[in-house]
Image (cartoon, rainbow, N blue to C red):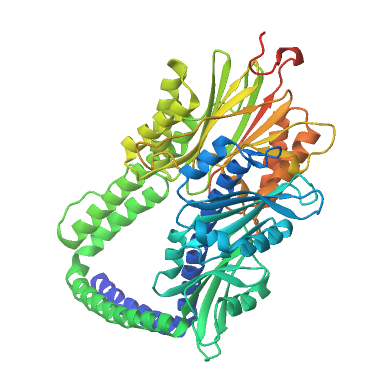
Amino acid sequence: MKGLSLRYKLLASLTVIPLCGLLVFLWVAISTFSSDKIAYVFDSSLWISKTRAARVNSEVSSVISLSQALVLTYRADTKNLAETGTYYFDREAKFLAFQVYAVNEQTGGYERTVDMSKTQVKPAVGARAQVFDALVKKARTGGIVLEGTDLSPGSLLMAARFGDANDPKHVVAVTLFEASELAAVFSESGTDTSYLVRKSDSQPLFAAGEIAQGWGAAQIWSMLAEQKTPEGISELISPAETSFLASFSDVGVADLVVISMVDKNSALSARETLVRRSQFLFVAILALLTIASAFASRGLTLAFRELNAVAQKFAEGQFDVRVDIKSGGEVGVLASNFNLMAEEVSRRMNQTGRTGQANEFLLPENHARLGTVEVVGHRQPADRGGGDWWYYFEKEDKAYIWVGDGTGRGDQAALLSSAVRAVASVIHFGPHVPVSISIAVLNRAIYETFKGQLTMSFFLACIDKTTGEMTYANASHQPPMILHMSEELAKQTDFVPVAAVGAQRLGEKIDGEFEESRFQLKPDDRIVFYTDGVVHLRGPEGTNWGEQGFLASVANAFHAKDRIDEALGGIVGDIQEFRGGTPLEDDATLILIHFEPEIASVRPIGEAA
């Protein structure tokens, strides 16, 4: 091309080079089409499995929490629930039947001591006593067992053991609950077919039907289970020689797994159509590029020199430089677009700096002593920005602890946290009100601000610094764990979960009601507040830390360190070591409380000073 003017060199470059690049791209796209599409389908299928597994986990965990709340009202002397337990059962629309089985000290077997059923299922439940008895035996060894049932459309049976199996005082609660929303999820028709399967015996709880003759959820899981991982993907061949792209994800509770299947031929056929259309689009773009290059090449020479000089300064960090637009047409549009890009980059960089600090401004100091209550906290935001928020303050003889997990990210999280922080300030400096009213006010403020688009799980606790009485209200948040300290190294079973009440998140509806509960703390008690990002940590190999790993770390830290700020440092160190540099999927927030009054100053609630 020696001897040609810059105009013709530019014209040749704008046509020949894109043409060669397009031909190479098409060749590579065709040769790698199958593997790319399969990877895409696997990713999509695994995302569907994980999303549905998370939904099942949330639903089952909610039922476990509600069942635990009823069991806590069980009285061994009367072998019945307290009046509050019966009241909660009648009010909970999700529960259709609830039975409690206690150990018979003479026979060593179980006897049914509580039997409650809603009217619409009472006859059917009475006729299936053997089904309930068999499920109780499974729960003795399995802890939590779910089973499909035809007692009511879209319902599930769950047996949950509360207490150690070797403890003669443990009980097993069997709950028949309405799960029509989950049933609808697994019956939806689309490109994928999903199943909810019990891993121990490969039995499906919800199944969309057989994909091929003699090939259903049980057979599919027996093949996928060979991977021995919490989640995975695989290509399976049906008895009819049909290829399916399968994925699975462990629910994380009750020995359940979600399986999703996509027909490989259907998936590839859809992508081939998209590729053909892309080929026509690229040809059209190339033609337009060639025509535009012929008209623009003459004036582009000088304009590109100026644009290159400005771009070089911009790359060196001079974000205030702009192109002087001297002409119209494509060159002028290019220069104008460059200026717009520079403005947007500068704006986003400034905004990113502010947004990244926004939530930090809304959080309290990491360490404080509120009279007899010592508080330390740690929040590790996810790379994409999360919605965790926590706070504390003292008011007269009370210490308040606030912790929430919002649905927003980035700017949304900052807005949601700002709204919550504003309400907390009003309650802080206003007259004392019960926590049930405080959290109801917070719910109304979030709903009226975001109209249900952003919600937040929340736990609000108020600790009497003199008596140790803790009143609290829960809005679908992980209940805190309480540890009564001793000389022995704590075990996971030594942690006492605060009874979870309130399945509604803040901001879901304007007229939400939140129950207020009480717990009596003892001197030297430690309380652990946390968000789900702490227990859902992922390691470099995809391993899940889980609640067991988390509580083991907390127990070791409390045993090894006298001060809770040092214990917090140990736990954070365990978190970083487990992650091994793996990015956080969600914010991880951890708050430790130490109640340490003078022994003589703590007296039972209601006793005169």
Query: Which quarter of the rendered picture does the C terminus lie within?
Result: top right
The percent coordinates of residue 584 (x first, y second) are 56, 50
Residue closest to the far right: 487
| Horizontal side of residue 493 vs 63, given as left or right | right
> Which residue is at a point 46% across and 39% down the rendered structure image?
356
> Which residue is at a point 45% across and 30% down the rendered structure image?
439
Q: Quadrant of residue 328?
A: bottom left
Query: Which quarter of the rendered picture does the N terminus lie within?
Result: bottom left
**In the rendered image of this protein, does residue 237 appear above or below residue 258?**
below
Residue closest to the far left: 328
Q: Is residue 123 visible?
A: yes
Q: Is residue 541 visible?
A: no
Q: Nearest the camera: 267 or 320? A: 267
Residue closest to the far bottom: 240
> Which residue is at a point 48% across and 58% down the rendered structure image?
121
| Horizontal side of residue 297 vs 218, given as left or right | left
